Each structure stands twice: as structure tokens, then as C-alpha cells.
Image (cartoon, grey):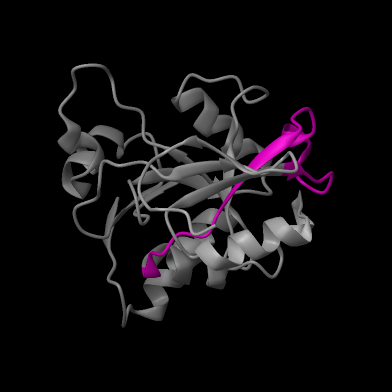
Amino acid sequence: MLLKLYSKNNNPDDIQRVVEILNEGGIIIYPTDTMYAIGCHALKERPIERICKLKDIDPRKPKLSIICYDLSNISEYAKVSNNTFKLMKRNLPGPFTFILKADSRLPKIFRNRKEVGIRVPDNPIIHEICRALDAPILTTTLPLEEGEDTEYVTDPELIDEKFGDKVDLVIDGGIGGLEPSTVINCCEDIPEITRQGKGELIE
């Protein structure tokens, strides 16, 4: 199912429809400020397992990330030092993934992992959904096979053609990008950029 959403003035019923899908354990594909992503309610284990199966990954191993509405409730899911919080505040919302030490309040599927990625994308569509959901959204990139046309991860109609029968909803927010987020590991005293992607970090 393909749903067209806009950067502003969306029908509240459409946003509520997305929230209901997430609350019921559904999987959605949605735009961010970098690439289209696949995600679900971050506090529900079954859809997380579905996503891991779809991407053929072990849920215990990859560094799964969560999208938060803002920085106010990040301490519920990760341990954040004062310096790291200030760094995040200078750069978010934006195309960055901050790797932090995970907190025990995350679902048990996260319990064996010591780290979790935190994102606050500068994209009004996912921002509005996250606010209405009042919970974090698990996020991971769409799978792209080697040699496959990149339009299958940038064009919402082609994304729906490829993944529509595997997810509960594809959100059309316009043509997406191909550059991933910049990843900053903040688990040690000195933050380290482990992947330079979109955006320049303000230190």
C-alpha cells in the first residue's frame, strides 16, 4: 500500500493511519533526510524480527538504530554524557547517527547489544509520525542487491513495486537520496566518526 505524504499540511487521518499500523506491529518504509528506510515501532519485538528476516540479518548482531522525535527522551533508551548531549544538540535534527551505550529499558531483542544508534532526521514527514506515535521508530536502510538499479531504493513507486508485498505501508515522500547518514561513535570519551556520509559534523 502506497500513501502520499507531504512536508506540511498532511491530513491528520493519514498520520493516524500510519501510527495505527505501527502500534499494531506493522512495518513501514518511509523517507528520511538521507535515504528511504524501513522501520517499525522500536519497542515491539515481533516487527523488529520481521525486519531482520527481510534483510536476512541476525537481530543480535547488527547495530540497529532508533529514530526519536527529539532529544528530550533519549536518556530512556541510551546513556548520554553531558558532552555527547551537547554535541547531539548542535547537530540534530540532521543526517547523523550517534552510537551510544544502550540502556536496559530497550526491548529484550536489544539486551545482548551494548550499543544503539540514535537518529533525529531533519525530515518533516517522519518527524510528524514520530511525534504522533510518541515512541521511537526502529530504522534501517532498505536492502539493495549488488548491481540492482538504485531507483529501487529512491523512487517510492518502484520501492512499493519491490517491497509492497513484504511491508504494511510504503510512504511516498518524493524521490529519496542515496547518501547514508554520518555515523559518530560516542561510546568512548572522544567521539569518533566511523562513517562519513551526508552532513558535516559541528564539533
What is the count of numbered marks? 0
For image coordinates 60% across by 19% down, the residue present is 58
Q: Is residue 107 left or right of residue 29?
A: right
Q: Position of residue 29 (x, y in %)?
A: 38, 47
Q: Is residue 2 above or below residue 190?
A: below
108 up-or-down from 62: above or below: below
Magenta part of the chain: 101-124
Residue, far right: 104
- The answer to whether residue 27 shows anywhere in this view is no
- What residue appears at the point 54 percent right and 57 percent down from the top-left corner? 203
> Can residue 30 be seen here?
yes
Q: Which of 57/3 is in front?
A: 57
| Quadrant of the rendered image containing residue 69 | bottom right
- Is residue 71 toward the left or the right of residue 169 in the image? right
Residue pushed farthest bottom?
9
Q: Which percent across, then down, holds residue 43? A: 69, 49
Residue at 38% over, 70% down: 124
- Seen from the viewer's position, the closer of residues 37 and 177 is 177
Is 181 a magenta residue?
A: no
User: Which residue corresponds to the image point at 39% horizontal and 44% vertical from the top-left?
Assistant: 37
Percent across and percent down for residue 24 are 58, 53
Residue 86 is situated, as x and y percent measured from the top left of the image, at 66, 65
Q: Is residue 117 magenta?
A: yes
